[in-house]
Amino acid sequence: MGNREDLLAGARRCLEEKGYLRTTVRDIASAAQVSMAAIGYHFGSREVLLNQALFAALDEWAAGSGRLAGQGDTAEERYADTWDRKIQDFADMRWLWTANVEAFVHAQSSPELLAILAEGQRRSRRMVAAQLRGVPEDAVAEEDVRALGSLHIALLSGVMVQCLTDPQSAPNGREIAQGLRAMVELLES
C-alpha cells in the first residue's frame, strides 16, 4: 500500500479505537506509520481523511448487511427480521455508529461535512424507499422517497441512538413492527 491507502487504513483503525472526535492527526499518522505531513499532502486535513474513512466504512456496511433483506413468511416478519439484523449491527459495529453520531455533531460546525451528510441522507432515502417497494431506485416515486424513505431513515437513526444509549431497553424488530402497526391503527381511527 502507498501512503494514501495506509492513511485511510490508519484512520479507520483510529475511528474503531478512539472515535471521530477524539482522533488526532498524530494518532492517524502513528497508526499509518507515516509522517503527519502526509495527511495534509494526500487529504488536506484530518477531517477530510476521517470523513473518507468513515464514509468508506458506511459504504462497506451498506453493501453488505445494510440492505433490507430480512427472512420470514410475511412482510411483517421480514421487516422485523431486517430490524433484528440492523440492531445486531449496532452492537457488533458500535464503533461505526458512534463515529457516525460524532460526525453528525461535528457537522454542526462544519458546513462542508454537513453538506456531505445531507447528500448521503438524500441518497439513502431513495435507496431505502426503492428497497421497501421492491423497485429500482430510478423507478421509485418521489412521494415514497420523501415519506417512506424519510420515515425509515428516522426510525433507523432513532433506534440506533437507543441501542447505543441503552441496548437492554432498545426495541427489537418485532416491537418495531408492532409499533408501526399500532401507529397505523391510530392514524386510521
Image: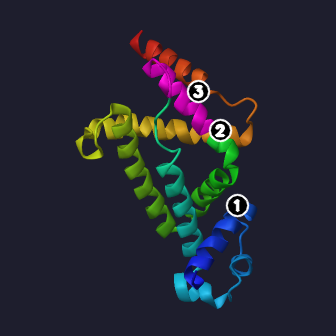
Residue 120 figure quarter: bottom left
Q: CA distance from mark 2 to mark 1?
A: 17 Å
Do tag 2 and tag 1 residues touch (Cβ < 8 Å)? no
Tell me residue 46's x, y (percent): 61, 77
- Image quadrant containing the C terminus: top left
Relative to residue 161, is residue 130 drawn left or right?
Answer: left
Residue 104 figure quarter: bottom right
Assign a secondary structure to mark 1.
helix
Indicate whether 163 appears above or below 38.
Answer: above
Q: To which residue does mark 2 refer?
A: 88
Q: CA distance from mark 3 to mark 2?
A: 10 Å
Q: Hey, what amino acid is under mark 1?
A: Glu
Q: CA distance from mark 3 to mark 1?
A: 26 Å
- Image quadrant containing the N terminus: bottom right
Q: Earlier in the sequence, mark 2 or mark 1?
A: 1
Tell me residue 185's x, y (percent): 45, 12
Q: To which residue does mark 3 refer?
A: 173
Assign a secondary structure to mark 3.
helix
Assign a secondary structure to mark 2.
helix
Tell me residue 80's x, y (percent): 54, 25
Q: Hey, what amino acid is under mark 2?
A: Gln
The circle on residue 16 is 1
* Region of the chain picked out in magenta, as a range: 71-87
